[in-house]
Amino acid sequence: MSTIDTISALLSLSDSQFRIYDIGRVITKISKNNFSKIELNQLPYPFPSQGHACIAIVFWQKKSAEPYLWFVKIPIDERGLLNQGAQNHFIEIIVEALGLEINSKHSKNDLTLTPTVQQEELLKSNPYHFTPAQYKLAAINSIIKVELKQAPSQHYQQCVDYINGTLGWDNWHDVAIQGIADISARLKQDNNAQLLAQNLAHFPEQVLLPLCGALENQSLSLELINALITCFNSNTENGLLQQHLLRALATSSTHVQVKVLISQLLLKPSTLDDDLLIVIATRCWFSLQESDLLMCFLEKLIQAQDNTLFTAIFKDLIAIPAIRPMLFTCMRQPNRSDALAQAIGQLFNQLRA
């Protein structure tokens, strides 16, 4: 091997076991086969966020169960393909910083070895590295522990005791974000999903908001979906809480109950809160893979009469490979409103300028 052209090849060089997750929107595992095709520009990146692929790389050596995490942000082009120059630059930085030998498999190529001070400085200066928000760090750590069959954090049991009512609903101060993430990643254990569904209405916002941020990465049971929807419908005066409750349904947004909720929101004659529109586009976009629902969303979006918002959300959605072709179809629909047609025309005039 004279050159390393992909991240997968870099990890294989060090004989690392690894897994890949998208972490830009909800946390979604990407299979090694698909990631290999993405790296070679044979597939577009499936979940771009703000023009980038935001990737969590989890790797470990067979001799050690302790995983390492890299968070990498690589730009994508207008076709949704990884920028090859940026990917190659990232790899060059890692090879140089760690002094890897690319022509032979050698113990020196163990990526999990503790770097020297000089190597650490080089790694920190990597322009493709990013630090996710705290709640995403907690969530990805919990998800990794489940997949690698490791025990949850020390905060897990206290969170279990809280959601089952043992601690009392007012005693939330010592419920840690990591414990909430552990519960969300282990919905099938310890009756967690049922306990959450039964007691959701008791949780104060200090628990409920971070819980929603963790649940957005999980496929939910029907009982928990219905509990979240009931809570959403019971809090029409609390816009912040509704945003988070809708986010919690993100990975389950193709479920019929969630699509009914989103349809009801989009078919209301009144305008919809901007933040809810943003949540639908950035978290619940799976539900928009039906042309009728996508068309309703675009018409509701134009009601906001905010060209900046329309442009930002349109660009965000058109970058998602699963949405892109249907979005082009909606743009050509003869029954689209004059306001929508005008907004689309203005957007393309801006892009051509």
Image: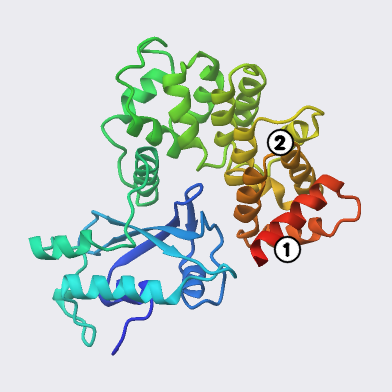
- Relative to 279, 11 lies left or right: left
Give the Cα separation between the discs numbered 2 and 1: 24 Å
Q: Is residue 246 above or below residue 231?
A: below
Q: Is residue 55 visible?
A: yes
Tell me the residue that label 1 is attached to.
325
Three-letter code for the amino acid on which mark 2 is drawn: Ala
Quadrant housing the C terminus: bottom right
Q: Is residue 214 above or below residue 110?
A: above
SS at badge 1 = helix
Q: Is residue 31 above or below residue 343?
A: below
Position of residue 207 measured from the top left corner of the image (x, y, whole percent):
43, 22
Which residue is rendered at x = 57% and y = 43% of the image?
Answer: 283
Which mark lies nearer to you, 2 or 1? 2
> In this orientation, which residue lies closer to the viewer: 168 or 69?
69
- Say whether marks 2 and 1 touch (CB < 8 Å): no
Which residue is rendered at x = 37% and y = 80% of the image?
Answer: 5
Three-letter code for the amino acid on which mark 1 is drawn: Pro
Quadrant housing the N terminus: bottom left
SS at badge 2 = loop
Q: Residue furthest right?
A: 334
Quarter occupied by residue 94:
bottom left
Tell me the residue that label 2 is attached to.
304
Task: Assess disc 1: are there few (<14), some (14-19) or many (≥20) residues with their C-alpha within 10 Å of its C-alpha.
Answer: few
Q: Which mark is residue 114?
A: none
Position of residue 306 measured from the top left corner of the image (x, y, whole percent):
67, 40
